[in-house]
Amino acid sequence: MQSNHTALLVMDVQNGIVSRFADDPEVLVPLQNAVKAAREAGTPVIFVRVAFRDGFPEISTRNKSFSTIAQRGGMTSADWSTQIHDSVGPRMDEPIVTKLRVSGFAGSDLEVILRAYRVDKLVLTGIATSGVVLSTLREAADKDFELTVLSDACLDADPEVHRVLLEKVFPRQADVMTVNEWISSLGVNG
């Protein structure tokens, strides 16, 4: 199924999150290009989303971020808001991992899938840079994955936080490059 030990993670690019962060559909083009290039190169594409069971048994009232979701409703596994956005729509053979917190690893089977694919290098994309990308990067670094972050395939509501993470924080644990730079390194046309 794969030609290397790398996987592209497309994280939280789901309807409810895209609708809050991507007013301009053009901002999703780098994500689309990354997915297309990964497929052409034989690199597994793994989609990560956040979703909960009906009744939100996974959400503690002590969790400041997620307890508002339980109060507001929505974000259940079948809800429109938790489905992967059509702009990067997964193929039937591409896993969709459901997580229960910010990191792609939290409450999910992501690590099991990565081990099954024998992945030791992750290429991270997603929404938001200060949320799922940061949390997944930190946890993946602690798990000794080699990491790349595609700077223009990450979005955040705060441009300054996005910049600081990409320029000052992420380079300590990951290579940071654009989608086009990454595509060039793959040797595909993108």
Image (spheres, helix red, strand yellow):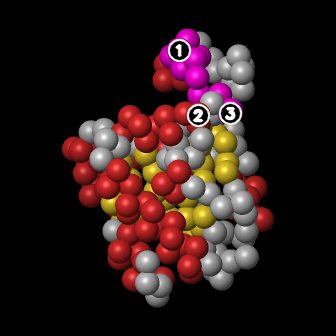
Q: Identify which residue is drawn at 68% across, 33% down.
A: 77
Q: 151 left or right of 141?
A: left
Mark 3 vs 1, N-terminal side: 1
Q: 166 left or right of 109?
A: left
Categorize mark 1 by other alpha carbons within 10 Å: few (<14), some (14-19), many (20+): few
Q: Secondary structure at mark 2?
A: helix
Identified by mark 2, the residue type is Trp
User: Does residue 63 appear in this view?
Assistant: no
Distance from disc 3 to disc 1, alpha carbons, whole Å, reads 15 Å
Residue 152 is drawn in which quadrant? bottom left
Residue corresponding to mark 2: 80
Identified by mark 1, the residue type is Arg
Distance from disc 2 to disc 3, alpha carbons, whole Å, reads 9 Å
Residue 151 is drawn in which quadrant? bottom left
Please give the range of residues in magenta: 67-78
In the depicted structure, whether residue 130 falls above or below residue 140: above
Q: Identify which residue is drawn at 36% across, 39% down.
A: 21
Q: Identify which residue is drawn at 39% across, 83% down.
A: 184
Categorize mark 3 by other alpha carbons within 10 Å: few (<14), some (14-19), many (20+): some
Mark 2 vs 1, N-terminal side: 1
Identified by mark 3, the residue type is Ser
Q: Secondary structure at mark 3?
A: loop
In the depicted structure, whether residue 65 falls above or below residue 26: above
Distance from disc 2 to disc 1, alpha carbons, whole Å, reads 15 Å
Q: Residue furthest bottom?
A: 187
Residue 33 percent location from the top left of the image: 43, 68
Mark drawn on residue 77: 3
Residue 141 percent location from the top left of the image: 53, 57
